Image (spheres, rainbow, N blue to C red):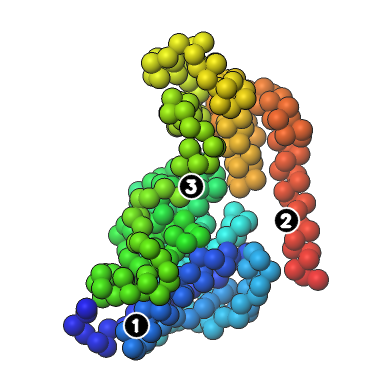
């Protein structure tokens, strides 16, 4: 245990509209339990927002905050300077673009204070220019759009990443793991184990553990050859492999692959490959403002027209309609909040 019982760490949780409750509450509760096990408030925190007003989460629950952005900008150079600032966000993060927040994050980081994010908050850190050349993590659903929007960031589908005083996690229960890592740094493994017991957590996950279920569990597929081919496909979406190249890699004939996919997936390998490329395209359409032609290229289509034709066949609407429907959904959501 830390030899300095007066050791304290202050965190600021900066709430972005539509933030996700699970990673936020998991992080706060992990720190609260650590305090209870220690017998004193080693971790203190406050909540902040742009204007100091309460913030609605994606579940519709509004959370009161303690400070505004202006107050926190004053705090970083005074006696209330935090040890860490964490951006808490969730859905529709692509629509949040606040230059004052970016400036605050850069100033905080440049003063030596740790900066981080929960769930999709890496998007805000990247907008602020803090993730160029840095390892980071973001929720798997947002990873395609993030990677296209911020090519200078080294983004991974990990639970969390720590790089040069920058802490990013994928959200969900991964924020629990990142907080346990922080507690371990401060107080050692014994306290981490006690916190885990209180949380009914059976182990501390490795930061590089996968975010998503393994393909075998996710798809209900048992054939190892089919699983390895699907992994190969998922790793080559921008420049799709030919069936001949896939067959060579899998050490199977084209006919064998065709038969296996019909048996296990109920469709041809070409059709399945097309569907996962279109799925990535859909994520890019709803998560980014990339032109449709760039989305097409990023997902391995030779032309925007061919991409649109395939997209309509699978989703019964064009890429343009997909994006328009998203904008309408956002407008309706904002109108509901305003009401």
User: In the displayed image of the protein, which residue is found farthest to the left?
Assistant: 3
Q: Residues within 10 Å of mark 3 (few under 14, many from 20)?
A: some
Query: Mark 2 and mark 3: span between their CA atoms?
Result: 27 Å
Quadrant in the rendering for residue 66: bottom right
Left or right of 110 on screen, residue 288? right
Q: Position of residue 28 (x, y in %)?
A: 46, 75
Is 140 drawn above or below residue 103 in the view shown? above
In the rendered structure, which disc, 2 or 3, sits on the residue that comes first in sequence? 3
Front position in the image: 53 or 333: 333
In the rendered structure, which disc, 1 or 2, sits on the residue that comes first in sequence? 1
Q: Which residue is mark 1?
A: 37
Which element carries disc 3, helix, strand or loop? loop
Left or right of 309 on screen, residue 63? left
Q: Position of residue 164 (x, y in %)?
A: 30, 60
Q: Which residue is mark 3?
A: 212
Q: Residue at x 50, y 41 (%)?
A: 217
Could you tell me if the residues under marks 1 and 3 are in contact, i.e. CB atoms within 8 Å?
no
Front position in the image: 139 or 35: 35
Front position in the image: 289 or 245: 245
Which element carries disc 2, helix, strand or loop? helix
Q: Position of residue 63 (x, y in %)?
A: 61, 77
Q: Residues within 10 Å of mark 2 (few under 14, many from 20)?
A: some
Which element carries disc 1, helix, strand or loop? helix
Q: Residues within 10 Å of mark 1 (few under 14, many from 20)?
A: some
Query: Mark 1 and mark 3: span between their CA atoms?
Result: 31 Å
Can residue 302 be seen here?
no
């Amino acid at each position: 245990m830390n030899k300095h019982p007066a050791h304290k760490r202050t965190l600021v949780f900066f709430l972005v509209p539509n933030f996700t409750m699970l990673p936020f509450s998991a992080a706060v509760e992990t720190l609260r339990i650590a305090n209870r096990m220690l017998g004193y408030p080693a971790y203190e925190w406050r909540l902040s927002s742009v204007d100091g007003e309460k913030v609605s989460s994606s579940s519709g629950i509004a959370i009161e905050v303690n400070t505004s952005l202006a107050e926190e900008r004053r705090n970083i150079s005074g006696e209330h300077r935090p040890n860490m600032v964490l951006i808490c966000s969730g859905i529709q993060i692509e629509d949040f673009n606040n230059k004052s927040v970016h400036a605050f994050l850069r100033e905080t980081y440049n003063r030596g204070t740790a900066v981080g994010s929960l769930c999709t908050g890496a998007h805000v850190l990247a907008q602020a220019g803090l993730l160029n050349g840095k390892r980071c993590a973001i929720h798997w659903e947002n990873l395609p759009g993030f990677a296209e929007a911020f090519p200078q960031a080294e983004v991974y589908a990990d639970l969390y990443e720590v790089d040069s005083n920058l802490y990013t996690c994928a959200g969900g229960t991964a924020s629990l793991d990142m907080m346990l890592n922080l507690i371990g740094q401060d107080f050692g493994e014994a306290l981490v184990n006690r916190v885990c017991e209180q949380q009914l957590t059976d182990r501390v996950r490795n930061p590089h553990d996968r975010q998503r279920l393994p393909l075998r569990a996710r798809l209900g597929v048992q054939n190892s050859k089919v699983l390895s081919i699907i992994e190969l496909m998922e790793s080559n979406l921008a420049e799709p492999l030919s069936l001949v190249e896939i067959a060579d890699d899998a050490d199977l004939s084209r006919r064998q692959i065709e038969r296996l996919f019909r048996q296990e997936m109920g469709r041809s390998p070409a059709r399945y490959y097309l569907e996962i490329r279109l799925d990535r395209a859909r994520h890019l359409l709803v998560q980014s403002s990339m032109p449709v032609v760039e989305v097409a290229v990023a997902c391995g289509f030779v032309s925007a027209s061919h991409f649109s034709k395939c997209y309509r066949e699978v989703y019964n609407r064009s890429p343009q309609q997909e994006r328009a429907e998203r904008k309408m959904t956002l407008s309706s959501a904002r109108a509901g909040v305003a009401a």
